[in-house]
Image (tube, helix red, strand yellow):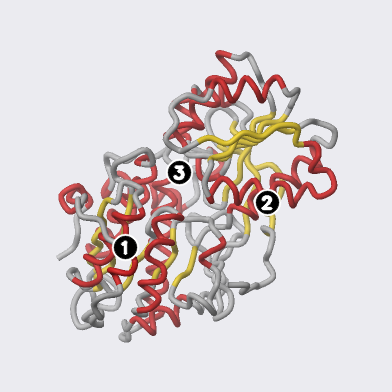
């Protein structure tokens, strides 16, 4: 029985009892059945401060509904079981235990967030359960020697920071830089990449301030950064606070720096529209997926198929929401892995096929961006493109850029 998109809230379980990784190790896991449905576990922040990202899970559920209606994959239907952890690592641990030991999932796929996935990584690797295409740009998902069952999907935050540094050096070589970053691994990684990319010119960063993900006010920090004399603002944080930063800078502080926005918050629906489209004009970010709102894709058959998918399987979704595209593309990548598995849907073969993606082109990835993996290469997507918001859609600026650290490293 497939998990309907509308049924996602009904399977969201917020458990009061919390556990630890040590507790997770207490019971051995049983190999998930491979004769019937392919049972896939997923954790999303359906509630809490990062709930905007839950669109990823809803889009994935809708995608698998579509695949099931088309007959499934290799004669099997997909049961996608997506549950809520409210961005709590402790709850993620408890939910993962339930999915593995009671729901008997074959794998965990596309779960959101760095802390939440780190909290379950050791448990899943000890039990040899695939933790595939984690929805996080942390470098932790590319250590195949230490964690051979965990693999990321998107470009890393650190590489994204280096791309912004290269852009700033080329386009604005003399301007001062301020950075407003989320005080967690997500924010630190991108900031580190920015500093690395600037190299000897990192002194151009005249001010940086951190904020907690739970903060609701950002005007004081913006005022300090404005007073630093910076003409470029690099923002790295969640979409809700990104929206407040863009609006506050423009409307309350009358500050109009070159605004560089992290890819994770580059959603028109969740960040730019709440900030005010007029305030968001000119914002720069990165992308590796097509923007359905970009008129240049209006005749693209894959975007037409995506729009049809949204109308039929995710009708209450927002077509301007980047996370709906993200979820669709991630689910499509997993489908390719399952196709490659053929009749052998064992956990070992799932990982073997995940490590054997060669020049796979997601239908809604930007041209020139291909997915490649190997036994020592757990970074499926290594390329991005700089984009700028024109008031309606994201427009490309420059060519596809190979993200930093494309040389395979397994530094554990």
Quarter of the image that includes the C terminus: bottom right
Between 317 and 52, the one lying in front of the other is 52
Q: CA distance from mark 2 to mark 3?
A: 23 Å
* 97 in relation to 285, above or below: below
Q: Residues within 10 Å of mark 2 (few under 14, many from 20)?
A: many
Q: Element under label 1?
A: loop
Residue depicted at x 61% and y 74%: 410
Q: CA distance from mark 1 to mark 3?
A: 33 Å
* 269 in relation to 125, above or below: above
Mark 1 touching mark 3, by CB under 8 A? no
Tell me the tag on residue 20: 1
- Residue underneath mark 3: 322
Residue depicted at x 22% and y 70%: 77
Tell me the tag on residue 164: none
The answer to which of marks 2 and 3 sits earlier in the sequence is 2
The answer to which of marks 1 and 3 sits earlier in the sequence is 1
Mark 2 touching mark 3, by CB under 8 A? no
- Quarter of the rendering containing residue 129: bottom left
Q: CA distance from mark 2 to mark 1?
A: 32 Å
The answer to which of marks 2 and 1 sits earlier in the sequence is 1
Residue 393: x, y in percent? Answer: 54, 34
Q: Residues within 10 Å of mark 3 (few under 14, many from 20)?
A: many
Between 364 and 56, the one lying in front of the other is 56
Q: Is residue 318 toward the left or the right of residue 173 in the image?
A: left
> Could one spot residue 12 in this view of the protein?
no
């Amino acid at each position: 029985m497939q998990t309907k998109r509308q049924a996602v809230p009904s399977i969201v379980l917020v458990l009061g009892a919390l556990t630890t990784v040590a507790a997770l190790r207490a019971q051995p896991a049983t190999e998930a059945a491979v004769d019937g449905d392919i049972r896939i576990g997923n954790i999303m922040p359906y509630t809490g401060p990062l709930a905007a990202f839950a669109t990823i899970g809803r889009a994935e559920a809708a995608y698998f509904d579509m695949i099931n209606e088309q007959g499934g994959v290799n004669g099997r239907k997909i049961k996608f079981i997506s549950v809520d952890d409210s961005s709590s690592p402790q709850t993620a641990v408890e939910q993962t235990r339930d999915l593995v030991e009671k729901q008997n999932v074959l794998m965990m796929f596309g779960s959101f967030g760095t802390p939440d996935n780190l909290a379950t990584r050791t448990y899943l690797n000890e039990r040899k359960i695939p933790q595939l295409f984690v929805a996080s740009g942390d470098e932790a998902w590319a250590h195949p020697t230490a964690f051979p069952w965990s693999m990321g999907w998107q470009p890393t935050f650190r590489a994204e920071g280096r791309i912004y540094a290269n852009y700033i050096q080329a386009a604005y070589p003399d301007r001062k830089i301020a950075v407003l970053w989320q005080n967690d691994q997500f924010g630190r990684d991108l900031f580190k990449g920015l500093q690395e990319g600037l190299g000897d010119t990192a002194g151009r960063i005249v001010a940086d301030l951190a904020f907690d993900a739970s903060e609701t006010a950002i005007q004081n920090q913006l005022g300090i950064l404005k007073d630093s004399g910076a003409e470029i603002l690099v923002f790295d944080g969640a979409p809700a606070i990104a929206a407040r930063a863009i609006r506050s800078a423009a409307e309350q502080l009358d500050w109009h720096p070159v605004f560089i926005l992290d890819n994770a918050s580059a959603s028109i629906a969740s960040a730019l529209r709440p900030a005010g489209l007029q305030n968001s004009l000119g914002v720069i970010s990165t992308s590796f997926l097509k923007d359905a709102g970009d008129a240049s894709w209006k005749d693209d058959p894959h975007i037409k198929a995506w729009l049809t998918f949204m109308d039929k399987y995710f009708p209450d979704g927002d077509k301007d929401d980047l996370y709906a595209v993200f979820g669709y593309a991630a689910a499509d990548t997993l489908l390719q892995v399952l196709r490659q598995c053929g009749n052998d849907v064992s956990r070992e073969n799932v990982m073997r096929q995940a490590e054997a993606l060669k020049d796979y082109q997601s239908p809604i990835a930007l041209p020139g961006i291909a997915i490649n993996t190997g036994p020592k290469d757990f970074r499926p997507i290594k390329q991005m493109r700089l984009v700028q918001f024109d008031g309606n859609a994201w427009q490309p600026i420059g060519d596809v850029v190979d993200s930093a650290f494309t040389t395979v490293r397994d530094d554990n």
